[in-house]
Amino acid sequence: MGTGKKIQTYIVNGSSPSAPNMVVGSLQARNLRKSQLGGVIFGCKNSTMKECLFKQLLGLPAHHFSYVKNIDPGLPLFLFNYSDRKLHGIFEAACPGQMNINPYGWTTDGSDRTLYPAQVQIRIRLQCQPLLESQFRPIIADNYYNEHHFWFELDHAQTNKMLSLLASLAVAPGTSALQNMAKSRTIFRAIPSRYTREVSEEFSTLALEAEHLSQSSQKSDSTDVASSLDGENQSLESQSDVKEVKQEEKDLIYMKLKALALKDHISNEHKADAEDTVISNGMPIRENDCPKEPVIGVVTNPSVINDISLKEKGYQGELLGVEDNCEQTPSASSEYQSLITRLIREVEELKTFKTEHTRLFEQKLGRAEREIQVLKRRLMLESESKSSTVLGDEKVIESFDDLLLDTKESIFLLGGYDSELWLSDLDSFYPSQNVLKSLRPMNSVRSYASVAQLNGEVYVMGGGNGQVWYDTVESYNPAKDQWTLCPSLSQKKGSLAGACANNRIFAMGGGNGIECFSNVEMLDLDVGRWINTRSMLQKRFALAAVELNGVIYATGGFDGNDYLKSAERFDPREHCWTNISAMNTRRGCHSLVVLNEKVYALGGYDGNTMVTSVEIFDPRIGSWMPGESLNYSRGYSVAAVVNDTVYVIGGVKDGYNIVDVVESYKEGQGWQETEGNAIGKRCFLTAIALTPPSV
């Protein structure tokens, strides 16, 4: 059902995998369009279900954002508990699907980033008995890709059947949190003999409580910020308890205000009618029975007072502690009604102030956390690079200044994803010494981009940040260690290919998550903009391209339906694309390099799995030959040639993990793992080997 084709979501839509929960290809998603999406199932376990319901927040690993982003408010949602394999519902989205609504959800102490950042706020549409898997499995039978796992996207027909089945098991709604609080708490307050004294003291108390709540909120905000920056966060349970108490305080103030408003209303409506002026425990007390001493009363049926509907009188919600006295002061009524209105407005302003400041603090903390993580990562990698570099006499190199680093042997690594962060990093990797040196980062986080070099500068084109695609281009000058913004591409795109020929930079193919492109753009520095040139013969997303002897070769990729074996070449002098022999294996998100006048196609994804295969194209022969296979299956890796040696770096292996092993190849020596691990885990990056110009 649905789209029919089984494709990699994070290849087609550009959303990210989130280790250790990466899933590849057909195991990932149906890739329904937004108009086709009728509902979404989220997953949880016993250990996370309580938090999902308490925070009214559902989440999935980042690579599921390809369809979570299509969730609009009101879309039906369901929650599947993997522990007992029961489906709960019916929920609906309370906001659009977003990344990192709560960046620390479902973590032990709030100090780690969540593994489930593709999130949506929810509300209960209808409370129903949970469904056993055997009950709902026939409805989504086509979603099962193995015995125990299924795609989470539901089309409209499946959603309607699921809603009908759950609705048949609807249960009476439980009492709300406010109702529970009302039942468990009765306010006993001595009532003065005069109504005016009662109202005056009530409002004095409420004013003090409101002021205390404001001060507490401000103090707690500053305390939360300080403790978060110091890394001394409370446990999730403690934080939840504090929030509950604060919310109860606010609810309590509201109930008191409403009670006083109702009391004043009843006073004005029934002053002339001396009968039934007080309701105590739900029973009317007649005027003659009105006690001379204070009466403590509780309204147990707030919807009806003296047969008058509160809704007709404009009053909503629940009331607590509504007491009255036989004596009232009419002249004070309007004055106190005005005071009630003002206090209600001030409490509303206080809530708005608290919400806005909490949001701002969370944004600042999120930015600070990301910056800290980036700095920690760079320091860690540089430290590992320095400490792990050993000379022949086993002397450990303590600084880069002590190393004899030859820029001719370096590979520039740009952006990518390290299983936790999208990166803007630019690093110079020296494979012979396993050293990683950090350079000035790009102007923005960038993955799924393309790279080319011209006149000693590196140009990075397109790509994205895991949520949106870019049309931006920037260039790096190694001599100045400086980035410069360049003219933008004609449209936003990622997983494109780049190459330089005839003193021009070419950007080929790619896609935007909806379309795959065949168009080619050329950057003419003399004109100062990108110019559309002759398109490729096929649409190619996640293709690979390389230049050899002034000719550009483009191979593989995804055309919107299938992964491709085909390859084509472009000669700027002829200004046309020409088909060449097809590869033996379908592949996309692979790497392409030139070694000894031959083109090497390395790894990639064949539509079902990541592959280890290598193919070699010799332009003199005009055909592809099998090469020696990689040690690890991998796609979205990068490759570069230094000193007649091919280095393959990063990527995703076996569909589940990011590769942290660098492989090298020399003709006649086969593939070998390089020693050390200066780079760490990294995928969706770009790379290029060049000789930086001398200063």
Image (spheres, rainbow, N blue to C red):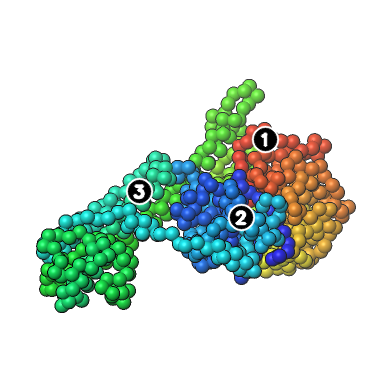
Residue labelled with disc 1? 432
Q: Is residue 67 above or below residue 18?
A: below
Which residue is at the far right?
A: 621
Mark 3–mark 1 Cα distance, whole angstroms, equals: 55 Å
Q: Quadrant of residue 432?
A: top right
Q: Residues within 10 Å of mark 3 (few under 14, many from 20)?
A: few
Q: Residues within 10 Å of mark 2 (few under 14, many from 20)?
A: some
Give the image location of residue 442, x and y in percent: 54, 52
Give the image location of residue 349, x and y in percent: 29, 63
Write the residue at 63% across / 26% down.
391
| Horizontal arrangement in the rendering, residue 557 relative to residue 304 (left or right) | right
Camera-side residue: 460 or 23?
23
Mark 2–mark 1 Cα distance, whole angstroms, equals: 57 Å
Q: Residues within 10 Å of mark 1 (few under 14, many from 20)?
A: few
Give the image location of residue 595, x and y in percent: 77, 46
Q: Quadrant of residue 248?
A: bottom left
Camera-side residue: 317 or 540?
317
| Horizontal arrangement in the rendering, residue 400 relative to residue 293 (left or right) | right
Which type of secondary structure does the marked residue at label 1 adopt? loop
Can the viewer see residue 460 in this picture? no
Write the residue at 43% across / 45% down.
236
Residue labelled with disc 2? 132
| Of labels 3 and 2, the one closer to you | 2
Camera-side residue: 655 or 614?
655
Q: Are marks 3 and 1 in contact (CB under 8 Å)?
A: no
Q: Amino acid at mark 3?
A: Val
| Of labels 3 and 1, the one closer to you | 3
| Horizontal arrangement in the rendering, residue 12 relative to residue 115 (left or right) | right
The tag earlier along the polypeptide, 2 or 1, is 2
Write the residue at 17% across / 76% down.
273
Residue labelled with disc 3? 242
